[in-house]
Image (cartoon, helix red, strand yellow):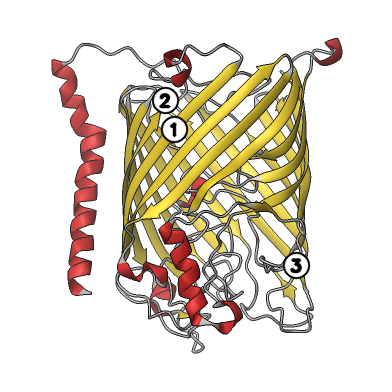
Amino acid sequence: MKPRKNHAKATAHCALKLIISCGFALINSEISQAAEPAPTYSRPSMAAYNAVMDDALLGNNYEKPVWNLHDTLHLPDWLTVGLENRVRYESLSDTFKPSQPSPAPKAAGGNQQIEIQTDLWLQAKLGNFRFATEFMDARGLLSDHGTNNTPNPPNNTIVDTADFIQGYVSWADKNAFFSGRGVEIKAGRQTIDLGSRRLVSRPGFRNTANSFTGLRIRVLDYKQWQFNAFGTLPVLRYPNYSSTPPNGNPNLLAANANLLIDGNQQWDLEDTQTFFSGGILEGYNVIKNINTEIYLYHLNEGDSTNNATRNRKYFTPGLRLYIKPKKGAFDFVAESMGQFGTVQYNASVNNQQQNHQAWSEHIEAAYSFDLPMSPRFILEYDWASGSKSSKYSSGSTDGRFDALYGDSMIDFGYTSIYSAFQRSNINSPGYRFSFAPRSDVSVLLQQRFIWLASAGDCWGGGSCSSGVSPGLVGNANGTSGSYVGNQLSATSRYNYNSSLNFDAGWVHLFKGQFAKTAVSTATATTTPGGDTDYFYVQSQFRF
């Protein structure tokens, strides 16, 4: 593994050079270039669909791609067509993740792969009706030899080949019944972003999307409030991967993993035994320029033939207060989330469920300087409860917060083969600093210090003691403590135009005592290696 580690260090060194060159070296090139007018549009994220999927009530904040199929094919105004492609190379060294259950070998070294996300969007507008479909192909190629087993087996967050992630009909009226309010009703398979996206989202960095099939109703008072209500069945991505061999047969484990690597197609299906519903009310400028959100989500989960679950039955209420960023002014975000219900981590214990009570908080305070390069500084803090112990005990209360269908990258950094931190059993202060050296370049620096909220619980996500996604727990002698480490990251983005964008990122995890000495919940082995480095570079093409 020594050559692999040296290769990883060299990769990280190159990553720093690339990030710096993206963020600073381009400034010098302006001397020999004609002055470039500042973009007059909001920049979509480096993810599919954002540039062409307009809001039925508010319109589209993004400029039409310079190179676009609609104009090239001379299509009518009522028809929208968008084709997007994202290609990402990523590398991970000295993994922090523990070994998977037998027959997988012990985790060691690192991992690398190429992720490709191709997306086709079609929409027809007929009066107030819209008929839309989105077809996505997500693949993970050229993974390291050991990827079938460790340390990052291919799974549904990376691979979902050739499938429809959206297909719905909607009715929208910007002035429903001459009330001055907008109303939208959407039925069918759809992706959903709500509020801060910490609990319900379509992940941006992740290679695959969350989809739901059902009904969503939206009412918008343009200057005062907005209300969203939904009732859905979550969509399961297939083929799926489980680190636990089906029927105890190790051969089926390898075969299942290879299905994903080889790109075999299997249609996604609704989980008919699970119902996800809720509502969120947003108020604008409720107290001066302070905006509010109040919400309640309900998840009622059950087992099906191809999908064993933890039978989560949660009510998740929440409240968010925030001020929108503005140059030369302070702003803030404060969000509090509760969670109550039952959950089952171990189906072998008489199918009994634990009571579930958990909490999570997010606070940030920021200032946007009215200066050249638009510098912005943010202080942030996140806390999400954990249980007193990672072991299931009949009659005990589970306190591990579950982020439902949220996007962890919003607060905790990159996902994909890195995915070090989620909104679960975490206690983490940090800061961010962003600036734009020129109109088409942006740079973001972030540092987070991570402790576990409960040293007795595991690190590794909401299901880390389920056997499906093994986590790490402290040593029995109590020397592991709760300090996981110090995460430092940098990202730089370059926008060639509204059709072609590039970005690169690097993160270094300085492992703390817990990460160095904790053991796997599945194999009782410690995580190997030194500090972790993750690097990626990607392009996004919209047409």
Q: Position of residue 535 (x, y in %)?
A: 31, 52
- Dot 2 and dot 1 residues touching (CB under 8 Å): yes
Q: Residue 479's image quarter?
A: bottom left
Comparing 189 with 278, the one in front is 189
Up the image or down, 540 lies above or below 288; here it is: below
Residue 472 higher or lower than 430, as above or below: below
Graded by Cα atoms within 10 Å as few (under 14), some (14 to 19) or many (20 or more), the crowding at tag 2 reads many
10 Å crowding of disc 3: few (<14), some (14-19), many (20+): many
* Amino acid bearing label 3: His
Give the label on residue 356, or none. Answer: 3
State the image coordinates of residue 498 (x, y, percent, origin top left).
Answer: 39, 22
Q: Which residue is mark 1?
A: 84
Under tag 2, what secondary structure?
A: loop
Residue at 43% x, 51% y: name it: 139
Q: Which residue is mark 2?
A: 543
Residue 79 sits in which quadrant? top right
Is label 1 in a helix, a strand or a loop? Answer: strand
Decide if residue 237 is on the left or right side of residue 220: left
What separation in Å lies between label 2 and label 3 (alpha carbons)?
47 Å
Q: Nearer the viewer, residue 194 or 514?
A: 194
Q: Quadrant of residue 244?
A: bottom right
Give the residue displayed 19% in from the left and 73% down from the top.
Answer: 2
Question: What residue sits 61% from the left and 14% below the top?
Answer: 78
Q: Establish if 393 lies above or below 126.
A: below
Identify which residue is drawn at 86% across, 13% down: 177
Among the two numbered marks 2 and 1 on one chain, the one whose residue lies closer to the N terminus: 1
Residue 277 vs residue 36, the one in the foreground: 277
x, y (%) of residue 215?
78, 38
Going from N to C along the chain, the mark reached first, 3 or 1, is: 1
Q: How many marks?
A: 3
Q: Is 324 or 459 nearer to us in this picture?
A: 459
